[in-house]
Image (cartoon, grey):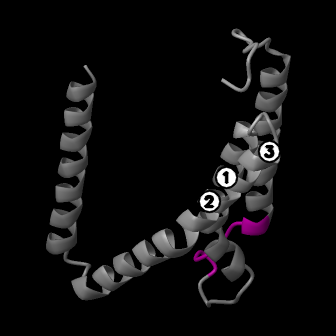
Amino acid sequence: MARVLRAAALTAGLATTGFGLYGLLSDAFITEPAGVLRWAVGALVLHDGLWLPAVCLTGALLAAAGPARRPVLRGWLIVAATLTAVGLPAVALSGRDTGNPTLLPSPYLRNWLLLLAATAAIALLLALARRRRPDPDPDPDPDR
């Protein structure tokens, strides 16, 4: 069953990648595919050179900080960092006069903070629910 699921995921991923490449090469509005390629390489370098090591280091530090390994906190930090990475450009550019009032019409800082607060509340509820739930298989020998 796992082999079938892996094959289906691989097929879906390859189909999505092919569709994206087809769109990149055939879209009339993309006049400089090399610029898109530079952007993609830059995003890959940022992801693998900055984002991934930061997430792994933070996760390792949190895992070492306590016996419960804090999975909800680690998950929320990943969500918060993702929201920040996606929303930071709009937050940084909001309030600037671009000459086009429809370019950045929303209060992005407020919305970003509301999203962080909402996801933090959900993470807190999940952490409280995990704390209340009894351990189904308490390990009498933790050194095992």
Disc sitting over residue 59 in the figure:
1
Q: CA distance from mark 3 to mark 2?
A: 17 Å
* 115 lies left or right of 10: right
Specify the quadrant that holds the N terminus.
Answer: top left
Q: Amino acid at mark 2?
A: Val
Q: Earlier in the sequence, mark 3 or mark 2?
A: 2
Q: Look at 77% across and 23% down and name the residue there.
A: 130
Q: Main secondary structure of the magenta part?
A: loop
Q: Secondary structure at mark 1?
A: helix
- On residue 35, the disc is none
- Kind of residue at disc 3: Ala
How far apart marks 3 and 1 lie (CA) works out to: 17 Å
The stretch in magenta equals: 101-109
Secondary structure state at the residue bearing disc 2:
helix
Badge 1 amino acid? Gly
Q: Which residue is mark 2?
A: 55
Q: Is residue 14 visible?
A: yes
Could you tell me residue 138's position as x and y percent? 74, 12
Residue 58 higher or lower than 62, as above or below: below
Q: What residue would you read off at disc 3? A: 120
Indicate whether residue 76 is drawn in magenta: no
Q: In the image, is 32 to the left or to the right of 128?
A: left
